[in-house]
Image (tube, rainbow, N blue to C red):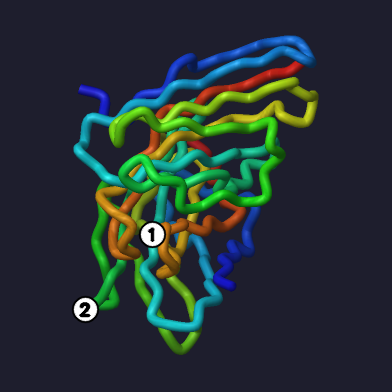
Amino acid sequence: DTAVSQTPKYLVTQMGNDKSIKCEQNLGHDTMYWYKQDSKKFLKIMFSYNNKELIINETVPNRFSPKSPDKAHLNLHINSLELGDSAVYFCASSQNVGANTEAFFGQGTRLTVV
Amino acid sequence: AQSVTQPDIHITVSEGASLELRCNYSYGATPYLFWYVQSPGQGLQLLLKYFSGDTLVQGIKGFEAEFKRSQSSFNLRKPSVHWSDAAEYFCAVGARNYGQNFVFGPGTRLSVLP
């Protein structure tokens, strides 16, 4: 069983489109995250949710809107896609918000905006 | 603010040789430290973690890391590298602010020569 699963794995779309990436975890974790990995492999936090409540919202354009219908799901919707949004997006989860927990990552979604 | 540096962008070793990947962190308190590995096209997998106690921690796949507070370092080591170890390696620190943000280093790409 996949612990953290993201769909789709690859996403190619045109500028200006709206797209969503879905994430689900079956670990029973309370906390979920979205990370962006750029072309230089640098990983940066975008959002963090704990029990469906947004707790971290880094400096991310408001075209990006996360939604957590329940604590096992954290989806990412992106409006008006731009070329600079091309990256790999990783979903992750951890047991709770305590610092002494590890994060479990999904396989990533490679988004290409053309 | 916490930060992580990995001085080596790319390391090449021969199969069977020993390996050490460097990681330095900046954090005001005792950190929670992690090493993750990312194989091409894959998500991040946890190799090992340090929370407290013994400063030499053992991980999966024969890896170990040593926490040295005086040097603010958490270097990853393996006595004998296998070709399958070729991947990107990320050091991370767990921030203790609410929301449990994992701050990642820029990564070190490991190549293994046959």
Q: How far apart are marks 1 and 2 (CA)?
A: 15 Å
Badge 2 marks a residue whose secondary structure is loop
| Residue A92 tag number | none
Left/right of residue B5 with respect to residue A1 in the rendered view: right
Can residue B1 be seen at all in this image of the molecule?
yes
Q: What residue type is labelled 1?
A: Phe
Q: Which residue lies furthest to the bottom in this view?
A: B70
Residue A57: x and y in percent read 56, 49
Q: Mark 2 belongs to which amino acid?
A: Gly
Instruction: Please name the residue shown 26% across and 67% down the image.
Output: B57
Q: Marks 1 and 2: same chain? A: yes
Q: Which SS class for mark 1? A: strand
- Rendered location of residue B50, percent (x, y): 30, 67
The location of residue A11, given as percent across then percent down, is 60, 13
Query: As rendered, which of A86 and B92 lies closer to the eye?
Result: A86
Judge whether B64 appears above or below A24 on screen. Answer: below
Query: Front-most of A71 and B56?
Result: A71
* Residue at figure coordinates x 54%, y 71% from the top left: B24
The percent position of residue A19, horizontal first and vertical second, equals 61, 16
Residue at (63, 24) in percent of width and height: A78
In the rendered structure, which disc, 1 or 2, sits on the residue that comes first in sequence? 1
Count of numbered tags = 2
Task: Tell me the subunit letter for badge 1.
Answer: B
> Quarter of the image containing the N terminus of chain B?
bottom right
**Residue marked by disc 1:** B34
Left-right relation of A38 to B32: right
Q: How crowded is mark 1: few (under 14 residues within 10 Å), some or many (20 or more)?
A: many
Residue B53: mark in rendering: 2
Q: Nearer the viewer, residue A39 or B100?
A: B100
Rendered position, B68 above or below A103: below
